[in-house]
Amino acid sequence: MQKGVELWQASGFLCISEKTLIKNYGHHYPDYMRDAAEMITKKRKVTRSRLGRRAA
């Protein structure tokens, strides 16, 4: 799947359902949870308007 194979094709080749493929092997993907980690650790820019609201 990392090379672009569709889930349904990979699951058919392996003789398992798409649900089983994702549940048991989806977390082995190198980018697993990367988006979530980036969003959680991303720092927000503080603008003057936000500073003004905090002080009020």
Image: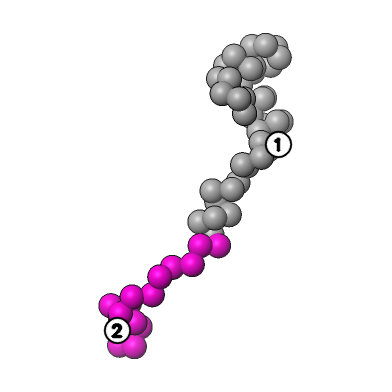
The segment highlighted magenta reads 41-56
- Dot 1, how many residues are within 10 Å of its Cα: few (below 14), some (14-19), or many (20+)? few
Task: Give the CA separation, mark 2 to mark 1.
Answer: 45 Å
> Is residue 29 inside the magenta stretch?
no
Badge 1 amino acid = His
Residue 19 visible (yes or no): no
| x then y, percent, for residue 33 | 60, 46
Check residue 45 for magenta coloring. Answer: yes
The colour scheme applied to this rendered structure is: one colour
Write the residue at 60% across / 25% down: 3
Marked residue nearer the N-terminal end (2 or 1) = 1
Q: Residue at x 63, y 17 (%)?
A: 10
Q: In the image, is 5 to the left or to the right of 29?
A: left
Which residue has dot 1 on it?
Answer: 28
Residue 21: % across, % down:
66, 25
- The amino acid pointed to by label 2 is Gly
Query: With respect to residue 9, does 54 lie above or below?
Result: below
